[in-house]
Image (cartoon, rainbow, N blue to C red):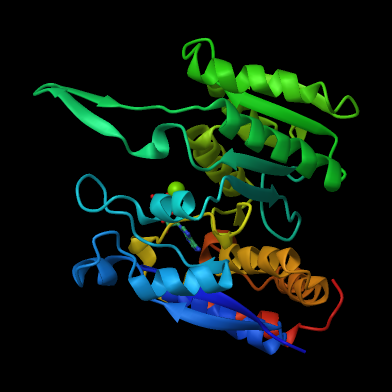
Amino acid sequence: MGRTPVTVARGDGIGPEIMDAVLRILEAADAPIEPEYIDIGKEAYLNGWTTGITDDAWKSLNRTKLFLKAPITTPQGGGYKSLNVTIRTTLGLYANVRPTMSLAPFVKTKHPEMDLVVIRENEEDLYTGIEYQQTPEVVQSMKLITRPGTERIIRYAFEYAKKHGRKKVTCITKDNIMKRSDGLFHEVFEEVAKEYPELETDHWIVDIGLAKIADTPEDFDVVVMPNLYGDIGSDIAAQISGSVGLAGSANVGDEYAMFEAIHGSAPDIAGKGIANPSGLLNGAVQLLLHIGEAEAAENIQNAWLKTLEDGVHTGDIAKGGKSVGSKEFADAVIERLGSRP
Ligand code: ATP
Ligand code: MG
């Protein structure tokens, strides 16, 4: 049987450590993919590729249309434009799907009932990176919300809910203040909602909405948000489920798809071999499901769950208890391939 070529970037910070762990697990599970490695990020930038992405990297992406990406450091303040944003917009990855669920009692969380999916708009909002200096003392940043872009992400959220047997879709905006931009997002939500009478819907203003997610996440199911609120909301959801290191995400467009962990490159723990590879592993599982390899996806997910159930935990979820490093964690998952949860 043929293997599906997938472009793979090992990333910065903890990227290479967690990517190694994940690729070892994929290989041991005989997941039918063929990695094509590319170098992007700081290295490429320092070698004169101003976007941080080489021509060869683009060629690979154009060929495979599938991307498994480890976290890449985005410089704060100056430097080059966020590479993550460049990739998402160039490849037209308009939908960012971020599921988080409780794994209680095996992973400690104050929210044992939570099981929610954040659907984050991925190309617009404040992430266009269009900022300019109006006067020496005034800077303006542009928040872009379009009707077609909004309609597409909201429809995606409703279709996702329908396909995955979810019951409710929640919209989060700040349309009491940003009446035009967030107002449009909310308005389109109400319009599209009418086409899905079988699904329950509600809307929250972002401040109290995210506070409620932090307090009673079990009341939420599918949550659709503009780019920035979606970024913040999904980090909150993942963190309160046990660790930001647990959740994976799919970035989906009409032609391309990219899979990754929701967290960043965690420079504070890079090189120590202690990072949790689970987020990237869950991204890889989503990739396998995306290409129709449900059997391999299920095998890996079951082994991963069994590993956590058996108490094999990296430092971020061990919460002071006994912990293992990224390598040992991957070994434990590999040992449990082929087992039932
Ligand atoms: P970005 O802007 O790229 O999203 P960030 O500023 O949100 O990055 P992260 O790199 O996600 O930051 O890290 C946030 C915190 O979570 C750090 O303390 C980091 O060590 C921890 N962390 C992130 N990922 C992991 C992981 N896989 N395993 C363990 N700890 C992690
Ligand atoms: Mg972050």
Q: In which quarter of the image is residue 336?
A: bottom right
Q: Position of residue 236 (x, y in %)?
A: 55, 41
- Look at the image and tell me in which quarter the N terminus lies: bottom right
State the residue lying farthest toward the left: 136
Vertical relation: 275 (above or below) 219: below
Q: Position of residue 283 (x, y in %)?
A: 62, 63
Residue closer to the observer: 148 or 153: 148
Quick check: 59 left or right of 258? left
Label count reads 0
Residue closer to the observer: 149 or 12: 149
Vertical relation: 148 (above or below) 62: above
Quick check: 114 left or right of 214? right
Q: In which quarter of the image is residue 12?
A: bottom left
- Look at the image and tell me in which quarter the C terminus lies: bottom right
Q: Where is residue 289 in the image (x, y as percent from the top left)?
A: 75, 66
Quick check: 72 left or right of 302? left
Vertical relation: 310 (above or below) 106: below
Residue at 57%, 45% in the rendered image:
94
Residue closer to the observer: 274 or 71: 71
Q: Position of residue 267 (x, y in %)?
A: 34, 62
Residue at 73%, 69% in the rendered image:
291
Residue at 72%, 50% in the rendered image:
102
Residue at 51%, 68% in the rendered image:
62
